[in-house]
Image (cartoon, grey):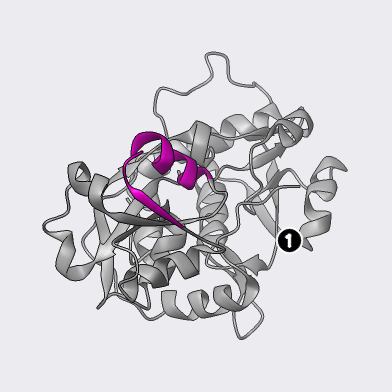
């Protein structure tokens, strides 16, 4: 199964610590819960409870703290959904390589763990609407952000991860720019920091993690680029096939949680360096 993963385990451990100490900055808040994306005929079957499945290795979304407790953005979101729907809620952690099969075997009702929406997963599960999209963004050195202009990129060196959709985007839309490829996003971002590249373009969420430790050096420049067909559909909740009542309840809860400010509060809590 494909998972939307930010970085490797060692880097994620550092990210988890950083998110507990970095203050939130003024930032644009996402609005991905579509208030018009409601079923015309929602399932009449009540939802007596929601059994959420997750994993414990995906900070800052779902992981264990030093006391062994499950915490993270996804954990808080699952609890908020259950509170909104007003039903009993359980959250059980599974190893990543077993979590999807556990959902398919009806050992849970919904999986909130970064399972990517692909042709394969779409054949096995239904998905809620997206609650966190993953745009592409430019990162530049702090001194260059104020003067950043997309129109000037033709003469710049742009660092990207080799083989990524973001590299393809740059080559297509900025054919005159010098593209400098790296094996990882971290290496590409470090190239901007040390001056061997003018800007970075890639997944904004991954860049936000890196920026937690590099705020004095660099920051986002320009606007986010939302291209779901290129950069992925974003984060959503996988639901066991046939559990339409659970999916409808989750979708309606996501709309209400945006409207009452809960989603914004969770985003600011877990993403102090916002990526929108």
Could you say which is closer to the camera, residue 247 or residue 178?
178
- Say few, some or many: other residues with alpha carbon within 10 Å of mark 1 (under 14 / 14 to 19 / 20 or more): some
Q: Is residue 198 left or right of residue 239?
A: left
Disc count in the image? 1
On the image, the x and y values in percent for residue 159 come to 40, 58
Please provide percent x and percent y for residue 210. Answer: 42, 70
The residue shown at (29%, 68%) is 24
Query: Residue 274's quadrant in the figure?
Result: bottom left
The answer to whether one can see residue 131 in this image is no
| Farthest residue, direction left | 147
Q: Which residue is mark 1?
A: 92
Q: Position of residue 125 (x, y in %)?
A: 74, 34
Query: Helix or strand or loop: what does disc 1 sit on?
Result: strand
Q: Is residue 123 above or below residue 201?
A: above
Q: Nearer the viewer, residue 195 or 224?
A: 195
Q: Is residue 168 magenta?
A: yes
Left or right: where does residue 134 sit relative to residue 275? right
From this viewpoint, is residue 247 visible? yes
Determine if the magenta segment contains residue 125: no
Q: Is residue 10 left or right of residue 94?
A: left
The residue drawn where x is 12% and y is 59% is 146
> Is 177 rendered above or below residue 127?
below
Bounds of the magenta span? Answer: 165-180
Q: Residue furthest right?
A: 105
């Amino acid at each position: 199964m494909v998972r939307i993963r930010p970085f490797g385990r060692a880097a994620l451990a550092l990210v988890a610590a950083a998110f507990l100490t970095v203050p939130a900055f003024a930032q644009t808040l996402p609005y991905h819960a579509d208030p018009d994306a409601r079923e015309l005929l929602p399932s009449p079957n009540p939802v007596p409870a929601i059994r959420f499945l997750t994993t414990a290795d995906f900070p800052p979304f779902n992981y264990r703290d030093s006391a062994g407790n499950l915490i993270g953005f996804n954990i808080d979101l699952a609890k908020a959904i259950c509170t909104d729907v007003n039903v009993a809620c359980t959250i059980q952690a599974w190893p990543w390589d077993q979590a999807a099969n556990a959902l398919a075997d009806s050992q849970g009702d919904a999986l909130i763990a970064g399972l990517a929406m692909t042709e394969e997963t779409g054949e096995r599960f239904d998905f809620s609407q997206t609650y966190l999209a993953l745009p592409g963004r430019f990162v530049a050195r702090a001194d260059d952000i104020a003067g950043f202009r997309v129109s000037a990129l033709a003469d710049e060196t742009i660092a990207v991860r080799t083989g990524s959709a973001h590299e393809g985007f740059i080559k297509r839309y900025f054919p005159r720019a010098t593209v400098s490829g790296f094996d990882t996003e971290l290496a590409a971002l470090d190239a901007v920091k040390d001056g061997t590249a003018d800007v970075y373009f890639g997944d904004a969420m991954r860049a936000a993690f890196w920026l937690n430790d590099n705020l004095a050096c660099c920051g986002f420049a320009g606007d986010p680029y939302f291209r779901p067909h290129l950069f992925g559909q974003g984060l959503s909740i996988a639901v066991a096939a046939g559990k339409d009542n659970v999916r409808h309840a989750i979708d309606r809860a996501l709309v209400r949680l945006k409207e009452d400010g809960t989603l914004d509060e969770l985003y600011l809590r877990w993403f102090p360096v916002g990526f929108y």
